[in-house]
Amino acid sequence: MPDRVNEIYHRLYRHFGPQHWWPGETQLEITVGAVLTQNTNWQNVEKAITNLQALNLLSLPALTKIPVDILAQHIRPSGYYNLKAKRLKNLIAAIGREDEDLASFLATDLDTLRQNLLAVKGIGPETADAIILYAAAKPIFVIDAYTHRVLLRHNLIWEESDYREMQELFMSALPEDVELYNEYHALLVKLGKEFCLKRKPKCADCPLSGL
């Protein structure tokens, strides 16, 4: 199993090259993006983040002050905007009101940070782990729908395998390395978008063909 996990990574890296993910310039931008990307594609998230940047709203003080209904309108391109505005507000309340509070919040040890994130209403394991890996730069492997699909189609998991089981599959097979986890997750997303499609997958041309 570890050999197959490593072989998948090397094949994807050779085929796609480095992905330069996550596309955010600050810890706050990455954190906000992790919430906004729930159930949507990144192009829609970028539009929402651009709206926030244009209005100087990408700071904890600004996001704290803005009414939730107004925030919802600014992040409308991301979809489920009323729900996501509430989730952002919940997360900001847990982090603090000042920009330096985020660095302090993310600086806690990995287990504590994960517990704190999962305690926020609307923040599930995938969002929490994306914030931990990409914003806090701590070693945890992010699992998403693309990952589940790839693993299932290559008989590495059962249909009913849960998030923790899939995460353990990677973390037990790979060295504890933030950059590796970052790149591997991004490559799986790339594969899911271009070849391992939900319907009509392009298996014959897939870089994992024959694995």
Image (cartoon, rainbow, N blue to C red):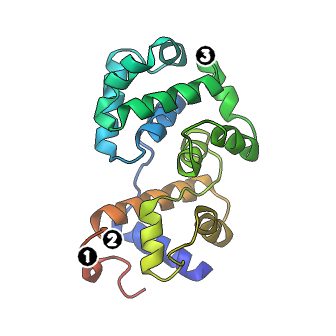
Q: Nearer the viewer, residue 96 or 39?
A: 39
- Quadrant placement of the N terminus: bottom right
The amino acid pointed to by label 2 is Cys
Q: Mark 2 falls on what kind of element? A: loop
Residue at (43, 34) in percent of width and height = 83
* Disc marking residue 196: 2
Q: Quadrant of residue 200?
A: bottom left
Residue 80 shown left or right of residue 91 in the figure: left
Q: Quadrant of residue 191?
A: bottom left
Badge 1 crowding class, 10 Å Cα cut-off, few under 14, some 14 to 19, many 20 or more, is: few
Residue 27, horizontal then vertical, whole percent:
54, 32
Q: Nearer the viewer, residue 19 or 86?
A: 86
Instruction: State the residue position of label 3.
Output: 97
The amino acid pointed to by label 1 is Lys
- Would residue 187 be seen by someone viewing this image from the given angle? no
Residue 205, horizontal then vertical, whole percent:
26, 79
Mark 3 vs mark 1, CA separation in Å: 47 Å
Residue at (55, 56) in percent of width and height = 142
The amino acid pointed to by label 3 is Arg
- Would residue 21 be seen by someone viewing this image from the given angle? yes
Q: Quadrant of residue 80?
A: top left
Instruction: State the residue position of label 1.
Output: 202
Residue 113, horizontal then vertical, whole percent:
70, 40
Residue at (52, 35) in percent of width and height = 31
Q: Does 103 appear above or below 129?
A: above
Badge 2 crowding class, 10 Å Cα cut-off, few under 14, some 14 to 19, many 20 or more, is: many
Mark 2 vs mark 1, CA separation in Å: 6 Å
Give the residue furthest to the bottom. 210
Q: Does 167 appear above or below 129?
A: below
Badge 3 crowding class, 10 Å Cα cut-off, few under 14, some 14 to 19, many 20 or more, is: some
